[in-house]
Image: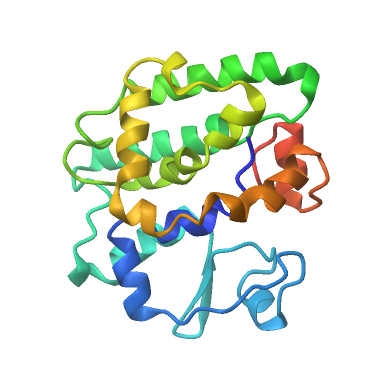
Amino acid sequence: MPVPDQHIHETATGAALKTVEAHSEQQDLVNPYKKEEHFLAINPKGLVPAIEYKGRALYESLVLCEFIQDAYPEHGLNILPTDPFERARVRLWVDHVSKAVIPASQEAEKQDTTRKELYKALSDLSAQVKGPWFTGEDFGLVDIAIAPWTARDYIASENRGYVRGEVGNGWKEWAERLEARDSVVKTTSEKQYYAEIYGRYLRDEAQSEAAKATRAGRVIP
């Protein structure tokens, strides 16, 4: 199932939300297919989110999450463990989310196979959860990476036969905690807002590079 705006959601989820609000100036993006020149100067791909920091540009949502933690340590985000091994382990599972969970084929004849692959990817991920959140007590980078998908997985339930309870390994319980978390709720739009956006994806009409990659089952560029 594609998630057109999940990447902007990632960067605004969790404690990072307060940091973003305190140190940023938002730009309206009325037409997702036509970005302003100033925004394209920050991110030539035209994808959100992107930021300008002291005259220099950065983009890619999860990269920005780490940058926000490093640039503003006084906010105490703690989205990555301090132990080097655990930090590397978290990054491996974030990569798993990006490569195995997010890209889901939209071809009807492949939906059964894709759903099984999705269940395995989610089951493998949730088997690694060490507490209420992925690394234990702290809401961290893996939780941030998967939360936007979780907040919208009802689209897959309504259109692709996906059922949380069929995944196993505690996925359903973790997903419920994620979607109920206050910062996730505050950065999730109303369901009716997504009707037109997801309609284009479900009808294979979306034309962004991210949409094309999603339909082909490739990693989003």
Q: Is residue 211 above or below residue 114?
A: below
Q: Is residue 213 left or right of residue 102?
A: right
Q: Is residue 119 left or right of residue 107?
A: left
Residue 46 screen position, x and y as percent:
68, 66
Colouring convention used in this rendered image of the protein: rainbow
- Of 159 and 129, nearer the camera is 159
Q: Residue at x 60, y 52 (%)?
A: 192
- Of 221 and 14, nearer the camera is 14
Residue 71 screen position, x and y as percent:
31, 71
Q: Picture quarter containing residue 87?
A: top left
Quarter of the figure that contains the N terminus: top right
Residue furthest out toward the front:
192
Q: Residue at x 36, y 75 (%)?
A: 21
Residue 172 screen position, x and y as percent:
37, 25
Q: Picture quarter containing residue 42?
A: bottom right
Q: Is residue 20 above or below residue 10?
A: below
Residue 89 screen position, x and y as percent:
32, 34
Q: Is residue 23 left or right of residue 83?
A: right
Q: Is residue 94 above or below residue 105?
A: below
Q: Residue at x 66, y 78 (%)?
A: 41
- Of 7 and 93, nearer the camera is 7
Number of numbered labels in the structure image: 0
Q: Picture quarter containing residue 103?
A: top right
